[in-house]
Amino acid sequence: MCDYTQVHYKCSHLRYTVRAWCTKYQETQRRCQPNVVAV
């Protein structure tokens, strides 16, 4: 699973930014399930 950071905006929107791509993504360029590691 790829590691993501969850970002909260003042307007109450959410965004998930990639913290680190997993090796599976690096090999296939296909996204896997997100693993939120920080809020």
Image (tube, rainbow, N blue to C red):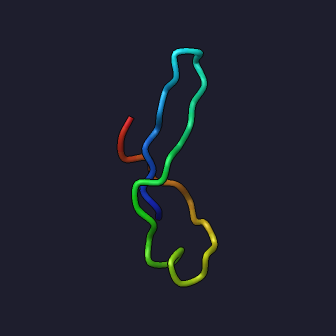
Residue 38 image point, x, y percent:
36, 41
Pick the quarter of the image with the C terminus.
top left
Q: Among all residues in the image, which is located at the extreme right?
A: 30
Vertical side of 1 occupied by 39: above or below: above
Q: In the figure, is residue 29 to the left or right of 35?
A: right
Residue at 47% across, 54% down: 18
Vertical side of 26 occupied by 2: above or below: above
Q: Among all residues in the image, which is located at the extreme left?
A: 38
Q: Among all residues in the image, which is located at the extreme bottom?
A: 27
| Marker count (numbered) | 0
Residue at 63% across, 72% down: 30
Please name whichever residue, 13 or 36, is drawn nearer the observer in this view of the structure: 13
Vertical side of 13 occupied by 6: above or below: below
Q: In the figure, is residue 26 to the left or right of 28?
A: left
Residue 16 image point, x, y percent:
53, 43
Residue at 42% across, 56% down: 3
Q: In the figure, is residue 36 to the left or right of 13?
A: left
Please name whichever residue, 35 or 25, is drawn nearer the observer in this view of the structure: 25
Please name whichever residue, 10 or 35, is drawn nearer the observer in this view of the structure: 10
Vertical side of 8 occupied by 31: above or below: below
Residue at 45% across, 50% down: 4
